[in-house]
């Protein structure tokens, strides 16, 4: 039976118990359902629970095994990008943030290895929080201020953070609402929240949702601009900007994205790049399925 009230739990955006099965994919941790009230898409029943709720090395290893088994990611593609390109992508984020806030204390939620913190530190008193101990340890070893804990264990500095950034975090959380509730407590009254997350407002998702690259085992929430705006409104924020974002990448990297999008001739394309020695030339891509939203507390 489809769409039984309550069968898929409550929608994190609007609280409705009414949701319908949207699709099943071996690349997701459970059925993808669409809320009948607000349209939010989320993984309703989680078989493994690959969420960022805390340090769990066994779960981290299981997730890596699952992603490898599914063949979703070519190992080394991201890591193989030139450091200058990776830094440039972080710098673009910083420049966009600086349009709204000029400095002060910054918190990067889900800081990972600290790539954003490393550039944000030039303009902000920047620190991060990262739940995975090994990842947080690597960031600290680079000389960055990263706490290895869960978001809800943090306490606000006096006056709150002037900027909070969440790059590719919301889609991983058990409850984005709970995460934003915590951020609302941590942020200064005149602070700025910057979020980057996949969006279903994407042509790839509309044409072939089952093959969308964002369907991976530890993604649980897939926002549209409308559902994210609604959730931010409910948690005490007002959206000030929203846009699709991209970055400069190598042609080798772009070819891998082409492959992951399920587009034809990805193999020959990659060989051509290698044969002609053009794989490391760069191009700016805006994949159209990543949105950036900035918001202020109300
Ligand atoms: Zn809903």
Image (spheres, rainbow, N blue to C red):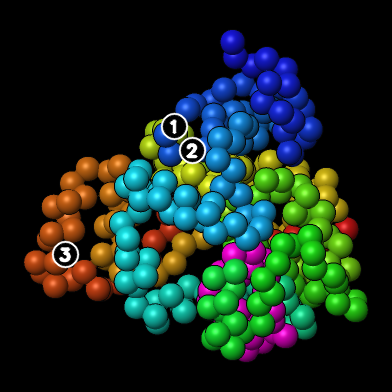
Read off the magenta span.
108-132
Element on which disc 2 rests: loop
Q: Is residue 59 above or below residue 201?
A: below
Residue at the image position 10 percent from the left and 69 percent from the top = 276
Q: Residues within 10 Å of mark 1 (few under 14, many from 20)?
A: some
Where is residue 8, by image quadrant?
top right
The residue where tag 3 is placed is: 273
Residue 232, given in percent of the width and then of the height, sits at 77, 50
Of the two numbered discs 1 and 3 on the same chain, state the one appearing first in sequence. 1
Q: Is residue 244 visible?
A: no
The residue where tag 2 is placed is: 28
Element on which disc 3 rests: helix
Residue 62 on the magenta span: no
**Label 1 vs label 3: CA separation?**
32 Å
Residue 250, given in percent of the width and then of the height, sits at 30, 69
Residue 118 on the magenta span: yes
Closer to the camera, 263 or 131?
Answer: 131
Residue at the image position 71 percent from the left and 28 percent from the top = 9
The residue lying furthest to the top in this view is: 1
The residue where tag 1 is placed is: 25
Q: Is residue 233 above or below residue 93?
A: above
Q: Is residue 162 visible?
A: yes
Where is residue 183, by image quadrant?
bottom right
Point out the frontmost of discs 3 and 2.
Answer: 2
For the residues labelled 1 and 2, say whether their Cβ atoms are less than 8 Å apart: yes
């Amino acid at each position: 039976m489809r769409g039984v009230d309550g069968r898929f739990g409550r929608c994190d955006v609007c609280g409705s118990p009414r949701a319908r099965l949207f699709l099943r994919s071996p690349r997701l941790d459970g059925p993808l359902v669409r809320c009948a009230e607000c349209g939010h898409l989320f993984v309703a029943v989680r078989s493994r629970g690959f969420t960022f709720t805390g340090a769990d090395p066994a779960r981290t290893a299981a997730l890596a095994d699952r992603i490898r088994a599914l063949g979703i990611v070519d190992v080394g593609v991201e890591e193989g990008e030139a450091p200058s390109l990776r830094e440039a992508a972080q710098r673009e984020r910083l420049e966009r943030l600086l349009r709204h806030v000029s400095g002060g204390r910054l918190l990067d939620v889900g800081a990972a290895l600290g790539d954003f913190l490393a550039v944000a530190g030039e303009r902000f008193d920047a620190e991060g929080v990262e739940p995975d101990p090994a990842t947080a340890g690597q960031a600290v070893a680079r000389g960055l201020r990263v706490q290895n804990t869960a978001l809800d264990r943090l306490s606000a500095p006096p006056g709150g953070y002037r900027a909070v950034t969440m790059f590719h975090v919301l889609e991983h959380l058990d409850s984005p609402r709970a995460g934003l509730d915590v951020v609302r407590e941590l942020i200064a009254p005149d602070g700025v929240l910057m979020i980057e997350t996949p969006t279903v407002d994407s042509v790839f998702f509309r044409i072939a949702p089952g093959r969308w690259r964002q369907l991976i085992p530890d993604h649980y929430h897939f926002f549209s601009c409308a559902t994210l705006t609604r959730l931010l409104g409910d948690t005490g924020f007002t959206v000030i900007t929203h846009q699709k974002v991209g970055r400069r990448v190598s042609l080798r990297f772009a070819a891998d994205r082409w492959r992951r999008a399920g587009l034809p001739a990805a193999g020959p394309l990659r060989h051509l790049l290698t044969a002609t020695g053009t794989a490391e030339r760069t191009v700016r891509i805006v994949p159209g399925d990543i949105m950036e939203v900035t918001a202020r507390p109300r």
